[in-house]
Amino acid sequence: MSIVIYSSAVSSGRIAGAIGSKDAALAAAVGQQALYLEALERDPVGTPQVLAALLAGTPPPPAQREASAYMFISLCQTLQTPMPHAWHWYLGIDTDPIAEYLEEDFGISGFSIREQFFSAYSHQCPFELPNYGGFPLVGYVPAAAFPALAAQMAHIRISEDDLWALKREMDYLRAEAHRHIRALAENMTFCAEQGLDLFSFCH
């Protein structure tokens, strides 16, 4: 089974304000998200109840924890500010080459997507993340961390011509990794400039 990582740039204050708000208009907006609609198809009765409980600030019972975590992801996606690049990375398949070529081609060693997005800062989230010992896994990076992360990658410049040159040389793995690295660097800068937190999801 492939494990996917994706992220939403959104202020933790907006998320905290939504949880417990009982906002009907927000519930309707969350109800348009693909994850919510998939859950609704599987469980047309329980899914609206789980979302209502999340927006009421009610902790989910054990049987609904996984569903509540997916509702949290849908909430983040509803309130997010679109980043320059939407990523959809496979753990290992994509993240290992990113780390490899960050070090080999750009001199940035020891950068782990899993560590940075899910472990290094998640304890700093101002509210408890919906991590219940399995998937989905939710991570957090505060806005305050992004100036340093962006500065670390400020020297990275990757153009479309650079990517095409790698493809012409049939270095497809490096070309794909460079495409991801460009997205990573530009999104880090975006979050730094906009003062946005980052919530990431792995499932």
Image (cartoon, grey):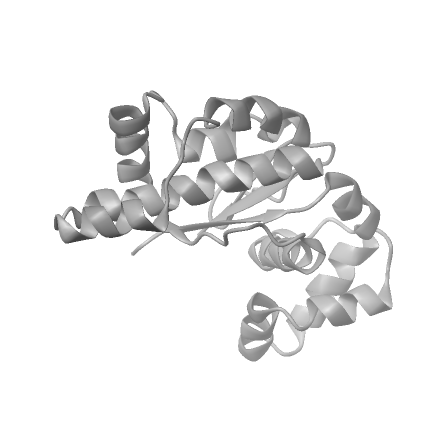
What percent of the width, then of the height, locates residue 62? 61, 51
Q: Is residue 28 above or below residue 20?
A: below
What percent of the width, then of the height, locates residue 137? 50, 44
Drawn side of residue 89 relative to residue 12, left or right = left
Report whether residue 196 is seen. no
Of residues 60 and 87, the one drawn nearer to the viewer in this rendering:
87
| Extreme residue toward the left, this view | 170
Of residues 62 and 112, the one drawn nearer to the viewer in this rendering:
112
Drawn side of residue 145 relative to residue 22, left or right = left
Drawn side of residue 110 relative to residue 80, left or right = left
Q: Specify the quadrant of the image occupied by residue 198.
A: top right
User: Residue at point 22% right, 42% down?
Assistant: 174
What percent of the width, then of the height, locates residue 105? 27, 28
User: Residue at point 21% right, 48% down?
Assistant: 165
Q: Specify the quadrant of the image occupied by residue 103.
A: top left
What percent of the width, then of the height, locates residue 141? 59, 33
| Extreme residue toward the front, this view | 161
Q: Is residue 124 above or below residue 190?
A: above
Drawn side of residue 174 relative to residue 35, left or right = left
Quarter of the rendering occupied by the N terminus: bottom left
